């Protein structure tokens, strides 16, 4: 067995996902150390040139299953299981993201393979891959190895950086007969945007609102604070799912990744899913009434207190300072 | 329709979790509770039942030591009609692959039309069990579902994926893992809590459900924890307690000003 296979996710326009490209770059680096090659799997009708261009990130072969739809995990499990078995591939690597978790889990069952998830680093040890996986809310890191190949590695969001060179990959079309159960889920609607379109990625200052705001109406308080500093408002997944704030403002695992000069977290506990989307902010200020909230472990300034009391006064003070 | 809900006993959120350095496993002594995410799965099952679909029974299923029975009692208090406990010393130390396989074997015996579970456990944070179980059962599956409607032998689900909200139609039988935004779990009535211990509970050992011994437990696991280490230390930030809000605000403004953020 040899080689590392990466799944490259794309949107409906055929743009590859940043985390997938990061995983390809990582796989190419590891394959180099292992003395083997990295390859990628894509599904759907991606043009030859676009598929071959994945070679820039270091894969030598791109397996393309044109007839298989993008967006649901199980058909892609069928494709990857076949490619791994036919080519005797040792590892499958996924960039962070929902589909990677599902495909990786399905492959685990299908190939009777070992799986690790939320992986933040991978290294080569004695000709094998060993991963680092933070556990217990990131309070410890476990080094995990595989008893046997194949091994499945599911990365954490933004764990792997994207590198670009000037290679070209060979594109090989594969025909896969889908499992009966893989055809029983139908993607009726993909990537629907809900709520207003807001731009948080370009803001230097972001005020993030979480469940601690208490109710939808209190986002006005966050907006006023953001306005006073010339910033924008972002939100956690929990409040977006609850309909308090638009999807476009969501930060974290399934949302956006930001790195502003200031991230002011208001009523955000700092769960891993949110943390991965904002931990690279230059300055993190957290206001939360729960002194045990994980965010206090990685913020630069933490304020333990009632944000409903503090935020309006802070807004006033900033306005006064700017005016004066 | 028959619904099975997978549940798990996890250390109580207030308990400081630690890894036993000997076994490199989570120390599971101390106060435990039903995984909070699973309460949403039970509530989702109840809402299918109350929403007009003919549900014959809701069965809570768990794998774990003797103490896991308490999680089943809680699941029954929240609405399950009976429960199934897979308990075998040989299961100890099972990793995700082994756990998914074992749970699939118990479920096979129940042959449910719908399997529900919480999207993650409070302790393991794996997000993957549902999809492992589904592939073993040869059923379609979807994870992190935040809206689910059952009708005419299928479920229509919504969830957030990489590019926004997806809507997916899935034929039953299926395995669905739900997110905590899907519903607000009800509180069990005192009567339900008192009656929970009287509801039927089946206990199975590995052999009862055809689990192959070499595929579970520490020896059957496909991954191995080599070492545990502390994370790289980040310099901890300054923490202030808000006692006098005017003073707190002054400190925050000074901090922002120092960094030229305002």
Image (tube, coloured by chain):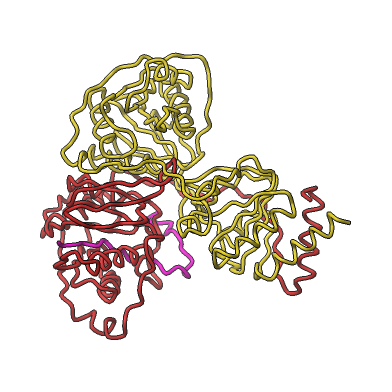
Chain colours: A yellow, B red
Quadrant where the N terminus of chain A sits is top left
| Membership of A59 in magenta stretch | no
- Closest to the observer, B59 or B43: B43
- Closest to the observer, A6 or B225: A6
Highlighted range, magenta? B1-25
Q: Residue furthest right?
A: A324
Q: Residue furthest front?
A: A196
Q: Position of residue B176 (x, y in %)?
A: 28, 53
Q: Position of residue B235 (x, y in %)?
A: 67, 51
Q: Position of residue B251 (x, y in %)?
A: 79, 62
Left or right, residue B215 beside residue B182: left
Residue under the point 54% across and 63% down:
A216
Residue under the point 32% across and 78% down:
B188
Left or right, residue B202 beside residue A202: left
Left or right, residue B244 beside residue A187: right
- Closest to the observer, A132 or A169: A169
Quadrant where the C terminus of chain A sits is bottom right
Would you place residue A27 above or below residue A111 in this image? above
Where, by quadrant of the figure, is residue A219 drawn? bottom right
Q: Position of residue A258 (x, y in %)?
A: 59, 43
Would you place residue A233 above or below residue A50 in this image? below
Q: How many numbered marks does the figure carry? A: 0
Where, by quadrant of the figure, is residue B204 drawn? bottom left
């Amino acid at each position: 067995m040899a080689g590392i296979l990466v799944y490259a996710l794309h949107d409906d326009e055929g743009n590859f996902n940043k985390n997938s490209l990061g995983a390809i770059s990582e796989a190419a680096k590891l394959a180099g150390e292992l003395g083997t090659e990295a390859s990628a799997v894509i599904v759907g009708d991606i043009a030859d040139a676009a598929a071959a261009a994945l070679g820039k990130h270091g894969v030598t072969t791109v397996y393309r299953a044109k007839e298989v739809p993008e967006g649901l995990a199980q058909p892609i499990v069928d494709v990857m299981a076949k490619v791994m078995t036919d080519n005797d591939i040792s590892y499958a690597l996924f960039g962070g993201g929902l589909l990677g978790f599902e495909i990786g889990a399905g492959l685990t069952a299908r190939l009777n393979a070992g799986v690790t998830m939320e992986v933040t680093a991978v290294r080569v040890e004695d000709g094998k891959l060993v991963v680092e996986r933070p556990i217990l809310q990131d309070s410890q890191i476990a080094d995990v190895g595989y008893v046997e190949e194949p091994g499945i590695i599911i990365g954490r969001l933004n764990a792997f950086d994207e590198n670009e060179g000037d290679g070209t990959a060979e594109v090989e079309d594969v025909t896969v007969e889908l499992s009966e159960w893989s055809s029983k889920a139908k993607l009726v609607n993909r990537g629907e945007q809900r709520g207003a379109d807001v731009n948080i990625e370009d803001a230097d200052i972001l005020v993030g609102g979480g469940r601690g705001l208490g109710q939808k109406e209190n986002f006005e308080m966050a907006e006023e604070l953001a306005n006073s500093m010339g910033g924008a408002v972002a939100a956690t997944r929990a409040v977006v799912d609850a309909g308090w704030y638009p999807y476009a403002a969501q930060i974290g695992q399934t949302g956006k990744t930001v790195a502003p000069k200031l991230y002011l977290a208001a009523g955000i506990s700092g769960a891993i899913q949110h943390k991965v989307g904002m931990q690279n902010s230059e300055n993190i200020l957290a206001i939360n009434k729960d002194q045990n909230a994980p965010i206090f472990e990685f913020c630069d300034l933490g304020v333990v207190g009632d944000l409903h009391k503090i935020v309006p006064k802070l807004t006033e003070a900033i306005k006064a300072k700017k005016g004066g | 329709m028959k619904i099975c809900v997978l549940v798990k006993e996890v250390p109580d959120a207030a308990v400081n979790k630690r890894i036993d350095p000997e076994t490199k496993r989570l120390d599971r002594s101390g106060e435990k509770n039903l995984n909070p995410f699973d309460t949403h799965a039970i509530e989702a099952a109840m809402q299918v039942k109350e929403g007009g679909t003919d549900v014959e029974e809701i069965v809570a299923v768990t794998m774990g030591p003797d103490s896991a029975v308490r999680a089943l009692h809680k699941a029954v208090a929240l609405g399950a009609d009976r429960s199934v406990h897979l308990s075998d010393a040989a299961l100890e130390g099972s990793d995700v692959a082994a756990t998914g396989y074992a749970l699939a074997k118990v479920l096979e015996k129940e042959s449910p039309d719908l399997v529900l579970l919480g999207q993650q456990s409070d302790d393991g944070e794996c997000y993957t069990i549902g999809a492992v179980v589904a592939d073993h059962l040869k059923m379609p599956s979807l994870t992190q579902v935040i809206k689910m409607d059952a009708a005419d032998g299928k479920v229509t689900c919504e969830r957030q994926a990489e590019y926004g909200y997806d809507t997916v139609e899935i034929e039953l039988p299926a395995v669905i893992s739900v997110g905590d935004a899907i519903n607000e779990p009800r509180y069990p009535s005192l009567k339900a809590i008192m009656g929970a211990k009287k509801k039927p509970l089946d206990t199975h050992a590995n052999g009862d459900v055809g689990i192959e011994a070499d595929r579970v437990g520490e020896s059957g696991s496909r991954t191995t924890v080599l070492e545990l280490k502390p994370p790289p230390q980040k310099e901890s930030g300054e923490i202030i307690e808000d006692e006098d809000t005017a003073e707190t605000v002054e400190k925050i403004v000074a901090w922002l000003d120092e960094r030229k953020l305002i």
